Image (tube, rainbow, N blue to C red):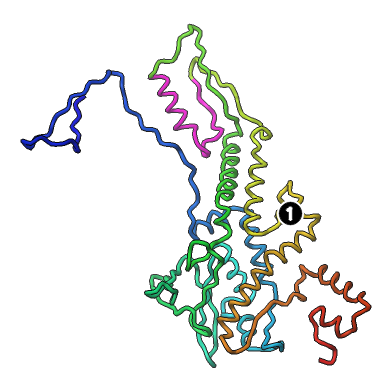
Amino acid sequence: MRVNWPWARRPRHGQARVENKQAAPSGFLALHMQGQARWTRRDYGALAREGFMRNPVVHRCVRLIAEAAAAVPFVLYEGEAEHGDHPLLDLLEAPNPRQAGGAFMEALYGHLLLSGSAYVELIGGGTQTRELHLLRPDRVAVATDEAGWPVALDYRGGGAKRRIALGRPGEGAAQFRLFHPLDDHYGFPPLEAALMALDIHNAAGCWNKALLDNSARPSGALIYAPKDGTNLTEEQFERLKAELEDGYGGASRAGRPLLLEGGLDWKAMGLSPKDMDFLEARNGAARDIALAFGVPPMLLGIPGDNTYANYAEANRALYRLTILPLVGRIARDLSAFLGGTGTGLRLWYDADRIEGLASEREALWRRVDAASFLGDDEKREAVGYPPRGG
């Protein structure tokens, strides 16, 4: 075999040196690459399609958190005084002509859970009628100044691009984002932490569907046992191997029946679900997804999880550990954006009006009422109410 190496040292006369090498006629060079798993992309569109729109566990987690958080009522304080009627509360009750307050907040929480960031634009200011509109995260890019600080949002929609000022209380746009350890401008969505579990759960569903489409036939082995005792030729073996890989490999071809020629026999070698632990792996992936969102698996109907004593405890843990911290974060951000600095206006949630915490509230009232060493005004203050004369 004559090989002309392009990087070989050239002789003085300017011609390439020719090297002659000899090798056995049967020699060959093979390059093997290790196969790797294919994972879902980590952008908002892929997470929304493969997660919320395709996976039932993700869909239920996002809806459960978003709907419950959107139903939590807000209270407006100015110092220690509580406002029962205020333009800011009216704005949150009817943010724009297309959405009521509950639908707006549900979409905001949904963007936050699937993207890690949510963007709100405030139209109008001062004495004008103000409206709040959500910007879809995949259409928004954060613009920075020379020092790297975010100053505006570049929004693309309908073939046009516009820039919206960012970080100005009472005008422009606001960004609400979850903590991201490696990014200064965008949040980290909970679903991205469970991306492997999401792909495993989706792949398990695809594999089961393919088996059902092909009559649920198990895997097995082809045995060649002709009467004359001969073996397959190399050409026959390679052709059979190529046909098996092209026609019967992959999840989309799982369980497809074989068309056998003379001398070939099929022996089923499929493992039982218990041996494969297939169902437990799927349930484990579902539990990982629920863990990333902070939803107790019991509320999603996932079997084999006895972390919580009962359904009521699981529901209480969902509110205390997931929903209320998220609502509190958004309340503080909305206060800074809509109320502005120096006004003393502060939004917070009203825990006494949350139906999911009714049993916890009743238990607190019973304990306080039984405290004989406290007066009536002290008891009212202990549960968050002003004195009777106040």
Q: Indicate left or right for 39 with 388 as reference.
A: left
Q: Residue furthest right?
A: 372
Which of the 4 image quarters holds residue 272? top right
Q: Position of residue 369 (x, y in %)?
A: 90, 76
* Quadrant where the N terminus is found in the figure: top left
Residue 73 painted magenta: no
- Element on which disc 1 rests: helix
Q: Position of residue 282 (x, y in %)?
A: 64, 44
Q: Which residue is mark 1?
A: 298
**Span of residues in magenta:** 235-260
Which secondary structure is most common in the magenta stretch? helix
In the displayed structure, 162 sits above or below 4; it is below
Q: Indicate left or right for 113 with 317 as reference.
A: left
Q: Indicate left or right for 338 with 311 as reference.
A: left
Q: Position of residue 356 (x, y in %)?
A: 76, 67
Residue 256 painted magenta: yes
Q: Which residue type carries mark 1?
A: Met
Q: Residue furthest top?
A: 228
| Residue nearest the viewer, comparing 263 with 382 | 382
The total of numbered circles placed on residues is 1
Q: Position of residue 206 (x, y in %)?
A: 56, 43
| Residue nearest the viewer, comparing 69 with 321 | 321
Residue drawn at x 7%, y 36% is 12
Which of the 4 image quarters holds residue 74? bottom right
